[in-house]
Every structure is written in C-alpha cells, then in structure tokens.
Amino acid sequence: MALYVLFEAASGYSLFEAHGLDEIGQNTQAVRSSIEDLNRFGKVVKLVAFSPFASAIDALNQVNSISEGLMTDELRNFLELNLPKVKEGKKPKFSLGVAEPKLGSHVFEVTKIPCQHNDFIVELLRGIRLHFDRFIKDLKPGDLEKAQLGLGHSYSRAKVKFNVNRVDNMVIQAIFLLDTLDKDINSFSMRVREWFSWHFPELVKIVSDNYLYAKVAKFVEDKATLSEDKLPGLIEIVGDEDKAKEILEAAKASMGQDLSPIDLINVQQFAQRVMDLSEYRKRLYDYLVTKMNDIAPNLASLIGEVVGARLISHAGSLTNLAKCPSSTLQILGAEKALFRALKTRGNTPKYGLIFHSSFIGRASARNKGRIARYLANKCSIASRIDCFAERNTTIFGEKLREQVEERLDFYDKGIAPRKNIDVMKAAIESTTQDNDEEMEVDKTVNGSSVKKSKKKKSKSEATEDDDAMDEDKPVTLNGDALEELKSEKKKKKEKRKLEQEQEQEQHAAENMNGENGSNAEQDGKKKKKKKSKDVESEDLPAAGESTKKKKKKKSRSEDDE
C-alpha cells in the first residue's frame, strides 16, 4: 500500500511519497535514526509535487484554514491532481499522511481520500522539514527562512488580533514611573523644606502639604520683603485667609537666618522643579486612568485604576494575569512573606497588592481574609473578561463591585447577597441592551441623513415649480422653524381626525334612530356607513326575537283561560 505525505511549508504545499516501507517495517526508532542522514532518508522519501503560494496573504489564509482543520479549494485541487483517483465502491490502494488529524478527517469527508496520523508520520514529517531545502530545486539560500519568518509574524498577529489601543505595556511603564515619581517628589520636597527652613523655619508647621510648601517658598522668596501687599497672592496659593495672615506674622518674627540672593535663587529654582514634577505626576495619573479604561475597564471599575495597573505590571501582562488563578492573584506581591511562611511553617499571607483596595480596609479584622479571597475571585473574573472580550464595557466590573459590596454587608449585617448566576445574567442582558441601542442609534442617524437628502431634493423641486411661493417664504429654515412647521402639521392632522370621528358618530346616531338622510355627500361615503349597517343588522334580529317571545306568552295565557 503506497504512502503519501502532505507537508505544509511556509512557501507552499508539497507532496512526498514514501518508498519501500511495509507495515511491519514502520518502526519509529529506525526512522528516527535515518532522518539525520540525507542519503538514507532520500532513498525512502521522494518529492512528487510542489505548489507554491501565490502571495503572503494567500499563505496566511491557507495556514489559518489548516490550523482550524479545514481544507481549502487550492489544497483540494492539489491533492486531486497529484494523488491517484479514488474509484467508488473500491478500496483505495494508498493513504495520505497528515500532520493535523482534524484536517485529515475533513479531507476524507470531502474527497474520500484515506488519511492517517501516527508517530511514524510525525517522524517522516520531521525529516522532510529538516531536509526540505534539499528536495526543492532552484531554491535560493535564505528564501525559506524569510518566508517562515514573515508567515510566523503575520499568523501570530492574526491570532492575537493586535490592537494598538490595548497594549498593556504602556500601563506597566506608567505605573512604574508613577511609583518612582512619588518617591522622587517626596525626597525632593523634603530637601526643599530643609533648605528653605534655614531662612524661614516657621513655615514648615503652617503649611504641611509638599506641593503648597514649594509654591509658597517660590512666592515668598525673601521673608524680609514679605508684606501685606503680597497677602492676596498668599490667599490664592494657600486657599485660606487665616493661614496667609499667620504666614505674614511668622515672617515678621522669624528666627531664621538671612540668605544671599544666589542661595535664594537656587532655592526658588529647585522649588519650581518640584512643582513641575508634581504637575507632571497629575498628568501621568490621568493618562494611566484613560489607558486602564481602554485596556482593563472591568478590573479598573472593580478595584481601581492604580491597584489594577499594579496587578498587571506584577503579573507581566494582562494575559498572564488572566491565566492566574484567584489564589495566586490573592497573594500577588507578597511572595517573600509566602516563602518565609512556608520555610518557617508559619501562617501564610492573606493578601498582597489587593490590600491597597478600599474593600479590605473597610472589612473588620476577622473578615479581612474572607473578603480578600472573595475580591481575588472577582478580580480574576474581571481580568479574564477584559483580556478575551471583543468589546470594552464596564458593566461586568460594576456588577462585580456590587457583589463585593453585598458580601461586605453580609459579613457585617447578615444581609444575604445575590447569586452569581443572577448577577451575570443581569450584566449580559444590560450589555445586549446597550448593543441594541447603539445599533438603533446608528440606524436612526443613517435614516435621518437619507431623509434629509430626500427633503432637500423635494424642496429643490418645489422651488423650481413655484417661484412665487419662494419669494414670500425663505428657502433656508432653522431647526426651530422646522419644528414649528412640523408641530403645525401635526395639529392640522389631529383636527381632521377629530372632525372625521364626529361625522362618523353623527351618521351612526342617525341610522340607529331610523332617519334616512340620503344626500349626495352621504352616497360618496359608503365605506364609513358599513359599520352602522352592521349595527342595524345585529339590532333587527334581536327585535324580531322579542316579538316572537311576546306572541308565545299571549298564546300560553289564552290556553290557560
């Protein structure tokens, strides 16, 4: 029985035939030893056909279909042209070896070509891959490597669905920079305090905030020149009139020493640097918030932007965080304490970076471990939704946050929380409603644009037909004028409907009373009188039945007499 092997290279499809191999001689160990020697392996395996891919896009499409276990039209044509034909009702005398079992089953379903996948076929494919450049003639050195590299990059990009806005590396760098800025601003502001305290030591007790202290130090410059003229400026910086007056009084009776103008200039420049750094820190925090809302909106709405970013940076990426179980996520950031506890056989830590969230701080000392475990569970769910969901929504994060709030109330007050299934169903329903609303808004926007274009056409036609009306009325109307015209039209339609209903009621009343007012106008309105005629036809048999009953009663009374 002949054996053919299908090999999917980066440059195209190739078909090989294995010669001189019986079922008894199909030993994987023997093949493994003969793979490295091309002289031995070339006697066993020979190239039958080769079909190169048309372009890089075609190669990507072919590889995507193969990875999904589907046979393309190009592969089907290639196999049918180069393999022996399978006759109906007869057993084929050959088989095709493939690397993917799903692809083999699909090939057999469509073309009835028998396929097989085992260790022997895998070893043959490994040898073909090793010596593939020797089998194909006119192949330049380096072409195969370039094709493999380009196809690998394009295939990985297509699988990952690369999105520039969802790059978590920016969040990792931003949170690292934010932490370093906090340390640097703190140390620099302490240096400003120590430096300016030689000149104005009483200011440290009055102004406690670092940023405000740097601002005041730059504004004051020399305490000797500080007078009541600078009081409005001090009030703007400090935000409190009493504090500003206190600074003025302290400057008058200050115990600090005088500084030279060069020293004061250096202090002011350093204070300006501290102010610039703190302002940049605010801008960086805003940037981090926006990036977290783009990358992990559910995690950010559940636990906060800063804590969520720290979790992502510690795990390495959002995908790594999504792969972590909730037990790992719970102690993420407390690895030293964990290994110390395992080494000394002590108590393991209950929480790591999650401790910075507000939920654990609000819980009592008894319930901190429980709420940390529950919060880690919800964080793992939120990170997986953010990582693998196609659309960015904060609905799941908000619902998970509500669940954590309910769990806190359950631990404190004993109020039973909702079930997870009900909460997730509500979240899915709200997401579907939001998607439907977005689709409706898009439809209305497109429909309104079409209607506006039609209205413009009708208006242009009307202007061409009636020039006299155009002289009296302006062509361009504002939105308010259009709304007034629409409201007037609606009022006129309502009046007409009311008049028609009143006329119908009058006609029905006349027909019930037996009045036959056959006018020329009533003949033209036959459709409106159909209902009244039906009413008459229903009333007449009822009257006939009542007369019959009266006659029967009279006859009975006469018989009794």
Image (tube, rainbow, N blue to C red):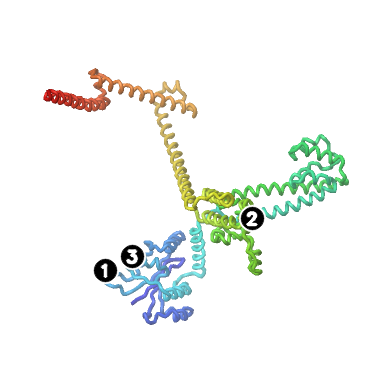
Residue 540 point in image, percent of width and height: 20, 25
The answer to whether residue 492 is above or below residue 393 is above
- Image position of 277 (left or right of 300): right
The residue under the point 41% across, 23% down is 467
- Front: mark 1 or 2: 2
**Mark 1 to mark 2: distance in Å?**
77 Å
Q: Are marks 3 and 2 in contact (CB under 8 Å)?
A: no
Residue designated by label 3: 109
Q: Nearer the viewer, residue 331 or 184?
A: 331
**Image-quadrant location for residue 223:** top right
Residue designated by label 1: 88
Which amino acid does the dot numbered 1 rest on?
Answer: Glu
- Front: mark 3 or 2: 2
**Mark 3 to mark 1: distance in Å?**
14 Å
Which amino acid does the dot numbered 3 rest on?
Answer: Glu
Q: Quadrant of the N terminus?
A: bottom left
Residue designated by label 2: 365
Residue 90 point in image, percent of width and height: 27, 72
Q: Residues within 10 Å of mark 3 (few under 14, many from 20)?
A: few
- Tell me the SS state at disc 1: loop
Visible in this render: residue 380? Answer: yes
Residue 394 point in image, percent of width and height: 53, 48
The residue under the point 46% across, 70% down is 138
The answer to whether residue 432 is above or below residue 330 is above
Q: Residues within 10 Å of mark 1 (few under 14, many from 20)?
A: few
The answer to whether residue 399 is above or below residue 234 is below
- Image position of 483 (left or right of 259): left
Which amino acid does the dot numbered 2 rest on?
Answer: Ala
